[in-house]
Amino acid sequence: MRTRRFAFFLLLSSLLAAQSSGDRMAWFQHDKLGMFIHFGPYSALAGEWNGHRTPPGDEAEWIMQRFNIPAPQYRELARRFNPVQFNAETYVALAKAAGMKYLVITAKHHDGFAMYHSAVSKYNIYDWTPFHRDPVKELADACARAGIRFCVYYSHREDWDDPDGYGNNWDYDRSKKNFGRYLEAKSKPQLRELLTNYGPLGLVWFDRGMDTPAHAQEFVDLVHSLQPKCLINGRVGNYGRELMGDYQDMNDNGMPTGGLQEYWETPQTLNTTWGFSKFDQQWKPAGVVIQRLVEIVSKGGNYLLNIGPTGDGTIPPASVAVLQKVGEWMKANHESIYGTSACPLPDSPWGRCTVHDSTLYLHVFSWPSDGVLRVTGLRTEAKSANLLTDPSRKLKVGLDHGVVAIAVPQRSCDAIDCVVVLQLVATPKVEEPILTQGSDSGFDLDYLKATTSGKAVKRFNRDGRFHISKWTGPEDQVSWRLLVSQTGRYRVSIRYSAPAAWAGGGFEIDLGTRKVDGTVQVTGEGYQYRVFDLGMVELSKVGEYVVRVRPTKELGHPLMYLESVRLEPNIN
């Protein structure tokens, strides 16, 4: 029966993949908001073991590792795990009511315990506990009925129960571990089960990276061979290298300043921990969650928001209350979230914006006291405006000293976020930023202020840093506009990271009337940024300059991970 079901599923996956030649990332770009669920035996411990409490802000799901709980003891704790209040329909209904479009469940976390009926290891919720049910299957079925995209989290590297897995060095001698054996005997076979027995998956959410790019690629290939349309998050690969996968995840609860030029997602908690802790009652207010969602979407990202059920399967009432309020706001304002893209406008004192075609959604957190909402930096003509929740009420639009000005009511329509819809005559274009300087100050040219062209893109890495990467030839460039008001000699320096394989690549920094040449030097493996002095240049006149950085020839690999260029005036 299993073989026949597997063959049918492969056929179904192939048919689904062939149905559309569109972008496989389209749903991810559209949906914006998802539910993360951290659920396992650690939920029953609730942040405490043998009188030891996980400290405030620490992850309760890491309790086995935090206190070096012996694997046999943890297994016996897991035997008593019996989440009788778990109801997949309740979980999915809450996600749907909150406006969430996809759901990710921890099918196996770092403790090695499978939250589904695994034939690979009896250490699973169906065979090991009195619960004797498959929550992953029940959630997959409930999601299918509700129109929610079902996804799974799988800890492919970390496994504190398996003697050959990563992470448990208190029970098992690290020098005697055979990691390849773990991958072949447990990790890959369990992933194969999830990819073949639970219907079409929206994505597989890997965690903790992988030891080598080759091992990571094996997991990427396994997913794509069984479910070609299934997405893979950026944590599948080694954290010290360019991230693999279809999109990037920020660090836990991370938030970029802005400007990333790829698909990304931020996983965040409703309180401070992922798994349930009875000691953590630091719940984020609904207003904070809503404004954070808007900020993430305005920067081009997705928001994966976590709930941590209790040991009996109950969703904490505080989580329910927050998500219900988020859902009320989403019901009225979802048009400004789903299917929108990052806002090209500069930061505004009143809030954020999202974009869909020629429509700007102005998310006003701070209502203007003078009744005029000013939109700076916009070069495209505006033709009309209205409140999203009251489209029949037209707002007067004009220009105030060249700035788009919208006459708004005296009171905000929503104390958390009142959305003003601004219709333009075409897709929005904005003024290219120009960097200015004060007396005796220089210029810091970073990723956020840069304009990229060719294959050069602004990226994130798991060290929590941002840089320019993927540029391999002269057509791939980074540029900045400067308004120089202090003439004289400037020292030019560059900050980047480069592994040994990229050493010797040539690059130039073009300042219009001057050029500075450089050669990439090794900074070390991983993301080890260093500053290199490139000498002095003369900027002999005030006015506008364009600074460009690019490789001098085709390299066949990225030039470097560029963090910034610095122009420092010589004031001696």
Image: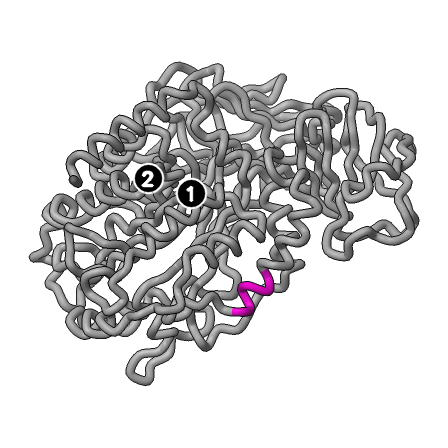
Identify residue for label 2: 199
Residue count near mark 2 (Cα–Cα under 10 Å), binned few <14, some 14–19, many ≥20: some
Query: Toward which corner of the image does residue 385 lie, by quadrant?
Result: top right
Task: Residue 318: say if magenta.
Answer: yes
Residue 242 can be seen in this image: no
The residue sitting at 24% across, 50% down in the picture is 157
Q: Quadrant of residue 161?
A: bottom left
Q: Residue at x 40, y 31 (%)?
A: 560
User: Is 88 placed left or right of 383 in the picture?
Assistant: left
Q: Is residue 520 magenta?
A: no
User: Residue 344: horizontal and vertical position, in percent?
Assistant: 67, 32
Q: Position of residue 349 (x, y in %)?
A: 76, 47
Residue that sits furthest to the left in the current view: 176
Identify the image quadrant of the N terminus.
top left
Q: Which one is nearer the viewer's eye here, 260 or 183?
A: 183
Q: Residue at x 13, y 55 (%)?
A: 164
Reading the image, the residue beneath label 1 is 144
Q: Viewed as shown, does residue 414 lie left or right of 194? A: right
Dot 1 lies on which element?
Answer: helix
Residue bounds of the magenta highlight: 317-322
Report the number of discs: 2
Q: Amino acid at mark 1?
A: Ala
Q: In x, y percent, where is residue 5?
A: 21, 36
Give the residue furthest to the bottom: 51
Given contact means CB atoms under 8 Å apart, are the residues at marks 2 and 1 in contact? yes
Residue 410 in view (yes/no): yes
Query: The disc labelled 2 sits on which kind of residue?
Result: Gly
Position of the C terminus, as image quadrant, is top right
Q: CA distance from mark 2 to mark 1?
A: 9 Å
